[in-house]
Amino acid sequence: MDEVKQLVTDIKNGNLKPIYFLMGEEPYYIDKISDFIETNVLAEEERGFNQMVLYGRDVTIEDIVGNAKRYPMMAEYQVVIVKEAQDLSRTIEKLISYSENPQPTTVLVLNYKYKKLDKRKALYKSIKKIGVIYESKKLYENQVADWIRRVLSSKNYTISPKAGQMLVEFLGTDLSKINNELEKLQIILPKGTQITPEHIEKNIGISKDYNNFELRKAIGDKNIIKAHKIVNYFAENPKDNPMVVTVALLFNFFSQLLHFHGLKDKSPRNVASALKINPYFVNEYISAARNYPMRKVSAVVSTLREFDVKSKGVGSNSVPQGDLLKELLVRILN
C-alpha cells in the first residue's frame, strides 16, 4: 500500500516514467494505479487525441509499439493503456526493443494481471531501469482485516475488529469485492462512523450471529447450545454457508491453537505476533486453549482433515452437508 501511495504521489508531482508495468495476482491495485494514470496524467481536453486504451486480446506487441511511438498532439504527453496485457504473455518479451528506446513523450501502461514477468529475462531488467514495475501480491487472509482498517481510516471511518472479521470471512481475500462493499457503506454512513457488525448485517446481509466467526468462538468456548444453533442455521442455509468454507476456517483456527500450545511466551502481545492475529482476538485463543489441551487439538485437526475430504464429496456423496456438519460438531465437542 505504501508503494502505491508513493507511485500516486510521483505521478501527481509530474514525475512520470515512460513505462508502467503493473503485474501480479491481486488485480485491485493494478486497476487502481491504471485508473489513476488514465484520469490524472492528461487534462480532459487533451485525452481525445492523446489517450488510448487497448486490449491485449485485440492487439499485437507491434501494434502497441506503433501506438507508443506516436507524438502527442498539442500536449506534453500521450498515454497508452493496455488492459488485459496478460493475453500477450507468449510474445511479451518482444517489447524489449521498445523498452530499450522508449518514446519520452509517451506514458505506456501495461496491466498484466495474474501473471508476472520473469525477473531473469531482458525485458524485466530493461523496464526496471527506465520505468516502473509494480507487483501486486495477493494478501493472506490474516492481512485483509488490517487492509480494511487502513482503507477506511484514509476515508475517515473506523471498523470494529468483529465487523472486519465478518467481511473477511464472507468475502475472502478479493480486495475488489471488499472495496465495493465498503464503498456502499460509505454512501450510507456519515464520515467518522465506526462500522459495526450491525451495520454489516443490515447493509450487506451477513448475519452477525450466525456466521463462521461466531461458530469458531462458540466452539472455542465450548458453548454447546450456541454452536448447535449456528450449525443448524448453516444446515438450513447451505448455499450461504458452504461446509467446505466452514471446515477450512475451523482447520485454520485449530492449527493456530496447536501453535499457541507450543509457545513458551503466552503473553497477549507475543500470541498476537506469533499467530498473526489481531490482539482483539487473543483472549479467544487463551479461552479455547483451556478447553482444548494439545492432545485434543491434535485429534480435532485430524478430524477436520477427514471432514474436509468428505465435504468435497469423497466417500459421502449421499450424506447431506448439513448432516455432515452436525456430525463434525459432535466429534469436535465430545
Image: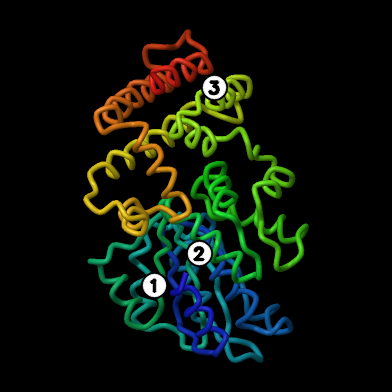
Residue 133 % position (x, y): 39, 72
Residue in view at x 49 percent, y 76 percent? 108
Residue in view at x 49 percent, y 64 percent? 111
Asked which secondary structure carries label 1, the reply is: strand
Q: Is residue 316 above or below residue 261?
A: above
Query: Is 106 in front, or is 118?
Result: 118
Which residue is denoted by mark 3 in the rendering? 228
Which residue is denoted by mark 2 in the rendering? 30
Mark 3 or mark 2, which is nearer to you? 3
Q: Is residue 144 above or below residue 317?
A: below
Residue 139 location, quadrant: bottom left
Query: Is 310 in front, or is 17?
Result: 310
Residue 112 location, quadrant: bottom left
Q: Amino acid at mark 1?
A: Ile
Real-space Cα separation, disc 3 to disc 2, in angstroms: 43 Å
Residue 56 % position (x, y): 50, 59
Contact? badges 2 and 1 (CB < 8 Å)? no
Contact? badges 3 and 1 (CB < 8 Å)? no
Residue 239 lies left or right of residue 20; in this view the side is right
Considering the image in quadrants, where does the C terminus appear? Answer: top left
Marked residue nearer the N-terminal end (2 or 1): 2
Mark 3 or mark 1, which is nearer to you? 3
Q: Amino acid at mark 2?
A: Ile
Q: Amino acid at mark 3?
A: His
Query: Is 236 in front, or is 334?
Result: 334
Task: For label 1, count other residues whose C-alpha is less than 10 Å away and answer few (under 14), some (14-19) or many (20+).
Answer: some
Task: For label 3, count other residues whose C-alpha is less than 10 Å away and answer few (under 14), some (14-19) or many (20+).
Answer: some
Residue 273 lies left or right of residue 33; in this view the side is left
Which residue is denoted by mark 1 in the rendering? 133
